[in-house]
Image (cartoon, grey):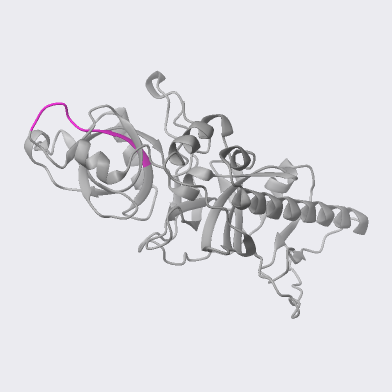
Amino acid sequence: MGHMDKKSPPTNKAQELKIVTDEKPLRLEPKEGGSKGAVKSHRTGVMKDVNLENRAGEQTPDVDVQEINHEEGWGERPKRSTANGWLVLALLAIFGFTLWAIFSVYKAPDEIEEVVEQTDEPEQKTADDIGEIHTMQKALKSTVSEYLAAETVEAKLLHSRHPERVGALMKQFYQNKKIEPEEFLKFGEVSIGAIAGRPFTIAEIKTDRGEKSLAIEQISNERFLVDWETDVYFQPMEWMDFLREKPTDPIAMRVIVSMDHFYAYEFNDEEKYQCYRITDRNKKEHVFGYVERGSKLMQVMNLVFTNYSTPKLPLILKLRFPKEGDVKRGLIIEDCISDRWLYATPPS
């Protein structure tokens, strides 16, 4: 890649919209101490895609294994790696234009200043490509604004991912609480990259109610959809209710997982089981989850933990308590549904 001449950012810009692009995928991590539903964008290291499809004829977890730079201390600002730009080209090509470019990290009102590498392309072609970028910027802001301003489930679903599945979850979630519309004020940092091979934007935004991060999938140049589940940190049941009721049927929960060495009661055989420490985003209470060594699920868990450089991972796991036994804080991990709190594809 040749040398790039960077333009100096304008000094009279009032609003920040910081864009960071990278060939490396994005990852969501918990934001400790933040408002409910906040997620933190995370820049990863080199992606190592692993195809776990159709293992033993079962549905596989939504896992693309990747090595990350930093996930110690939830909510800390992630370390940055140097952007090489080739993923940006791939993403742009997906949506119909061939600009060889990377975005700068300027502050700008409702727009993004571009740093474009010098090429031999005609000036008109470059102008057309930049025009498409501005179209995407406008669509992104419109999606975020209308999603936040929505006052009904129906209005929010218009700008949400997987509306057929999420609609029922929204109705459940808002059954005993009111949707609180927010006014979009400005963007903070916006990271563009890939999650499981799909183009995503992780946008840090400011509203009249505070700051939050949104995971937003790019469907086309003019269409974006917000991931509502990570926005509100959706759980099928509250974590403390889950621990108190001890359901014996598997439930998919968004949890923070680390390897551990607690072996007792029904799970006292260390040669038979691998132990994991499991808690929720708020880390109020923890339990120990167990997987049988040598099983296909154990292979998946090993794959995930081996390829990440952090001891704590935000995962979606299917969990259940044993139907019999005396263990109070031990449960069975039935499956690993996703190696992040976001479903890249709708779960079955």
Q: On the picture, is 318 further left or further right than 94?
A: left
Instruction: Report if residue 230 is visible in the image.
Output: yes
The one nearer the camera, 278 or 303, is 278
Q: Residue at x 66, y 54 (%)?
A: 145
Residue 174 position in % (x across, y down): 46, 41
The one nearer the camera, 335 or 49, is 335
Q: On the picture, is 120 further left or further right than 329?
A: right
**Range covered by the magenta-colored residues:** 316-325
* Number of marks: 0
**Location of residue 83 (image quadrant):** bottom right
Quarter holding the N terminus is bottom right
Up-down relation of residue 5 to residue 120 (above or below): below
Q: Residue at x 75, y 45 (%)?
A: 222
Residue 140 position in % (x across, y down): 69, 52
Residue 21 position in % (x across, y down): 63, 58
Q: Residue at x 73, y 50 (%)?
A: 139
- Residue 318 painted magenta: yes
- Residue 2 painted magenta: no
Residue 29 position in % (x across, y down): 43, 54
Instruction: Report if residue 22 is visible in the image.
Output: no
